[in-house]
Amino acid sequence: MQDPAPPKLSNPPDTVARILLVKSDQRGARARAVVLANHGVYELELESIAEIRQLLGSESFQLIVNDTRAHPDSPFHFLEKIPQHPSAPRIMLLCAKLELGRVVEAIRLGVNDIFHPPVDFKAMQESATELISSRLNGHASGLTTMGWSKMLGYFVEEEKPIERDARP
């Protein structure tokens, strides 16, 4: 049987930023791919690690924000699968605990910033804008008014269960 086609993400000509928001726990992961454009915000929901991997194989992002607070024992499971190369996305991590060993591992995996409870979402927004501003050709100022509250709301909305993936 043939693998299903990778999910498609809107790519308007006035795209400002492409950001992948990932929530993972010990059962799996789900994500929201967000395209910020001058004339709107486009989103694509992904319900499994398989869908997320397919999207990462076919689309590029400037930033990945991975929320692992529900997966405190192994917060790097998803990040270990992201290839590191010069055009790789910037990475932010939300984790349940901040311990020296985890910080070292996060740096090794290419994480650019780490947040832990209580999460300062304003500082997170500022960090995200700074992390990707060099990749946005002068459009970084527009990020503060274009969907950040909606995107960050993804990490504070009521939790829905993450479906267990069929594939590891």
Image: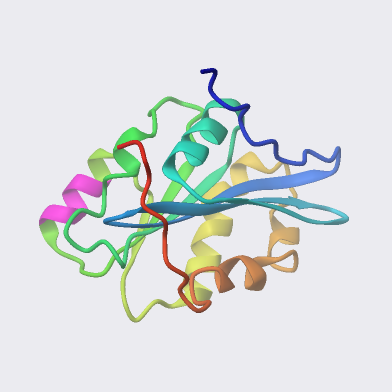
Task: Give the farthest residue toward the front.
Answer: 1
> What residue do we see at 31% from left, 67% from top?
69
Q: Which residues are magenta?
A: 101-106
The residue under the point 27% across, 45% down is 77
Q: In the image, is 132 to the left or to the right of 37?
A: left
x and y, in percent, of residue 1 in the image: 51, 18
Q: Quadrant of the C terminus?
A: top left
Q: Position of residue 38 (x, y in %)?
A: 84, 53
Residue 108 vs residue 158, the one in the foreground: 158
The rendered magenta stretch, by its main secondary structure, is classed as: helix
Residue 84 appears anywhere in the view: yes
Residue 155 versus residue 44: which sits nearer the camera? 44
Near-viewer residue (66 or 23): 23
Number of callouts: 0
In the rendered image, the vertical position of residue 114 relative to residue 13, given as above or below: below
Residue 108 falls inside the magenta stretch: no
Identified at 78% across, 44% down, the residue is: 15
In this rendering, the answer to whether 152 lies above or below 34 is below
What sort of colour scheme is used for the picture? rainbow
Q: Residue furthest left?
A: 101
The answer to whether residue 107 is left or right of residue 121 is left
**Is residue 110 in sight in this rendering?**
no
Instruction: State left or right for residue 143 relative to residue 112.
Output: right
Of residues 128 and 78, the one nearer the viewer is 78
Provide residue 24's location: percent of width, then percent of height: 37, 56
Place of residue 137 in the rendered image (x, y in percent of width and height, measured from the top left)? 72, 41
In the rendered image, the vertical position of residue 70 relative to residue 157, given as above or below? above
**Residue pushed farthest top?**
1
- In percent of the image, x 26 and y 56: which residue is there? 26
